[in-house]
Image (spheres, rainbow, N blue to C red):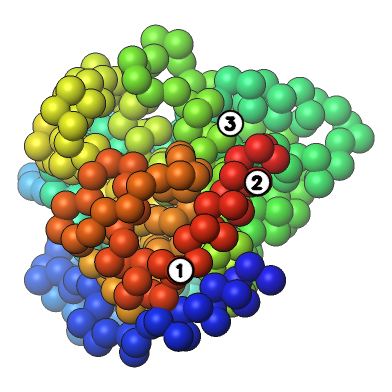
Amino acid sequence: MVAAHLQSAQALGGGARTSGMVSLYPQPETARVLVVDDDARVLGDLRRALAERTWDIVTARDADAALGVLETGPVDVVIADMHLDAMTGATLLGAVQQRYPDVARIIMSGRVDAREVLRAVPFAHQFLSKPVDTDALNWTLRRSCALRRLLTNEAIRAAVGASNEMPAAPATYLRLKRLLRDPNVALSEVSSVVERDVGISARILQLVSSAFFGMSRRTKSVHAAVSHLGVETMRSLVLALEIVRMFREGSAVKGFSIEALQRRSFVAAKLARGFAESKDADDAFLAGMLHGIGQLVIAERIPARYEEVLARARAERRTLQDMERALLGATHAEVAAYLLGLWGLPQPVVEAVMHHEEPWRLDGTRLGIAGAVYLGSVLADRSEAPLCSGTLAVPPGHLNADYLKSVGLLESLPMLRSIARRASTAV
């Protein structure tokens, strides 16, 4: 009902979609890709498969040779076979993660064995099945390399890539672990906890989006992802592998609350799902839930620096995005898009997360997923957020009146505020 009403309003006020869309994944001019496999024939096939692109392909037959290549110069992406003679591909990627954390890490295997996959989960960003599909491989490489050019600050990339673990809100983390220790727990109970936590949701979606566990279709929801994995795999992932961890008290950042972020993200996700067109509803929920993951990662990985960002943004009354760029060289939206894109989450979700603060830079004539997340996130913070005009510098916590008018929703704002108030009180 809400989406239908909003679509009607947009049809009256919005024009045709602009053609000058922002590309989240520009084609990189070149990139150095290290492929590691002990089968010379496979290496030859992959080299030929990638020959049409401007990739600088370097090959190695074993882990020691691969580490030697990394010592000789920068590498953008490492693709390692799961089965190497002296060292498994997972162990190699673990060494790459430790020594070269800003390098994208991909594992490939001819069979999906759950035990082997679990060994790769802590270190690999994505999983590719062998024989590797040429188009899928080229797209994965293009995406991974372009994302490195999206997040150009090497120190921030290294901080993001240093671990695949995600911090979770303490209460949610402990509740999930308690549920998973119950041999009779229902999947619905597990998914209801997972979908309320930014870090846990992101990790579970990564694992199914990148086909670590053989998901053949695109995941449309957290519940679908949890259902695909099943209780036993969830137990292994959360209890044994610790793919998520409790947000450490030592990482506490003044002015940042993980509990507040979780609550705000869940409300924003519910609102975004209601505001979006029905075909985009699931993606809007995921993007709304994950739009703040960049803040979570920065606050957990470089807490002292992020505390300074938050303090100065408040003191100088500047947007968080401006202060992040000034002090960190990257915004939390860019960090989120980099991480989620590297993990292989759906492009519409990544794109919406990237542009959720300024959706008019993506498309100023229709709401779209990014616009739904923008509205949801602002109104989740403050249902009575004031209006302002101008698309260049919108003050923190304000709604862009020109944008709402352009997408045909300015007159619907009282209804949007009412929906937001009810959603906030219901959580």
Q: Secondary structure at mark 3?
A: loop
Q: What percent of the width, then of the height, locates residue 301?
A: 32, 26
Q: CA distance from mark 1 to mark 3?
A: 50 Å
Q: What percent of the width, then of the height, locates residue 126?
A: 44, 55
Give residue 241's mark: 3
Please identify, in this view, whether the residue under mark 2 or under mark 3 is nearer the observer: 2
The crowding category of the residue bearing disc 1, from other C-alpha atoms within 10 Å (few below 14, some 14 to 19, many at least 20), is: few
Q: What percent of the width, then of the height, locates residue 282?
A: 60, 64
Q: Earlier in the sequence, mark 1 or mark 3?
A: 3
Q: Residue at x 34, y 42 (%)?
A: 397
Q: Residue at x 41, y 67 (%)?
A: 410
Please identify, in this view, whether the residue under mark 2 or under mark 1 is nearer the observer: 1
Q: Residue at x 25, y 78 (%)?
A: 21
Q: Amino acid at mark 3?
A: Leu
Q: Earlier in the sequence, mark 2 or mark 1?
A: 1
Q: Quadrant of residue 37?
A: bottom left
110 relative position to 309: left or right: right
Query: Viewer-proximal residue, 353 or 17?
Result: 17
425 relative position to 397: left or right: right
Q: Residue at x 50, y 66 (%)?
A: 412
Mark 2, residue position: 422
The crowding category of the residue bearing disc 2, from other C-alpha atoms within 10 Å (few below 14, some 14 to 19, many at least 20), is: few
Q: Is residue 288 above or below residue 181?
A: below
The crowding category of the residue bearing disc 3, from other C-alpha atoms within 10 Å (few below 14, some 14 to 19, many at least 20), is: some
Query: Viewer-proximal residue, 380 or 409?
Result: 409
Q: Earlier in the sequence, mark 2 or mark 3?
A: 3
Q: CA distance from mark 2 to mark 3?
A: 38 Å
Mark 1, residue position: 411
